[in-house]
């Protein structure tokens, strides 16, 4: 029995020394797979100095990256405040570009074997709401009669609160005032 264990050891040594002298590639070609990406939506707040959108993938050969914004090919401008990482699909931009980059993004990692893509990543840049200036005609109603006041509020980031105000800018709440069927 002792001799059999010794023979096994010699055979194992011979196999490993011969295998190490052969250059056998251990990597197998594979299509890209997304390994890490920024999940959306992202709200770019005024106190954020930069915003980074990540997209990492693995594959063999190593994947290349491209981005779309709102369904169109994204070509990032070559300016110092926008940085890209050539090793992956990550890019970062400075807050002075936030409004320029609001929209829906998607990362594509590709090589000769295929393409992988992320879910849409929405970048939301909140701005103070601005009601359009309107000149409305005076409406006269008798006390107790119902009236409908139409309001088209500007877009905003939820949760929004909308209040009716009088001419002297005092907020009022009354059970007789409703907005889309909800009392304010």
Image (spheres, rainbow, N blue to C red):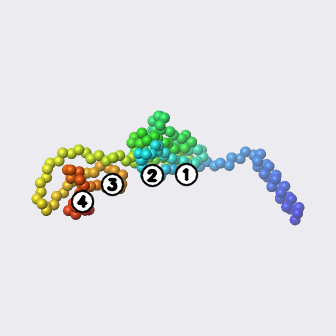
Q: Position of residue 101 (x, y in %)?
A: 41, 42
Residue at position x 51%, y 40% from top?
84
Disc 4 crowd, CA 10 A, few/some/many (<14, 14-19, 20+): few
Mark in the foreground, 2 or 1: 2
Q: Which mark is residue 40?
A: 2
Q: Position of residue 151 (x, y in %)?
A: 24, 52
Residues at marks 2 and 4 touching, judged by CB atoms closer than 8 Å = no
Q: Position of residue 115 (x, y in %)?
A: 52, 47
Mark in the foreground, 1 or 3: 3
Asked whether, in this view, residue 24 is left or right of residue 60, the answer is right
Disc 3 crowd, CA 10 A, few/some/many (<14, 14-19, 20+): few
- Label 1 to label 4, Cα distance in Å? 52 Å
Q: Which mark is residue 35?
A: 1
Relative vertical location of residue 172 with respect to residue 83 in this rendering, above or below: below
Asked whether, in this view, residue 184 is left or right of residue 103, the answer is left
- Label 4 to label 3, Cα distance in Å? 17 Å
Quarter occupied by the N terminus: bottom right
Choose the circle earlier in sequence order: 1 or 3: 1
- For mark 3, what is the residue? 160
> Which type of secondary structure does the marked residue at label 2 adopt?
loop
Q: Nearer the viewer, residue 120 or 110?
A: 120
Choose the circle earlier in sequence order: 4 or 3: 3
């Amino acid at each position: 029995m002792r001799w059999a264990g010794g023979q096994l050891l010699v055979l194992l040594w011979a196999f490993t020394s011969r295998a190490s002298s052969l250059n056998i590639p251990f990597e197998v070609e594979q299509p890209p797979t997304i390994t890490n990406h920024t999940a959306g939506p992202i709200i770019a707040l005024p106190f954020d100095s930069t915003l980074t959108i990540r997209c990492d993938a693995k594959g063999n050969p190593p994947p290349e990256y491209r981005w779309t914004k709102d369904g169109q090919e994204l070509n990032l401008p070559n300016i110092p405040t926008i940085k890209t990482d050539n090793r992956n699909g990550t890019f970062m931009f400075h807050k002075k570009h936030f409004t320029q980059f609001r929209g829906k993004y998607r990362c594509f990692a590709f090589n000769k074997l295929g393409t992988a893509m992320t879910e849409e990543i929405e970048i939301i840049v909140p701005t103070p709401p601005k009601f359009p200036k309107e000149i409305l005609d005076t409406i006269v109603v008798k006390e107790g009669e119902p009236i409908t006041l139409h309001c088209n509020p500007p877009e905003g980031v939820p949760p929004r609160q909308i209040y009716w105000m009088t001419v002297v800018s005092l907020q009022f709440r009354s059970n007789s005032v409703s907005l889309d069927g909800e009392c304010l």
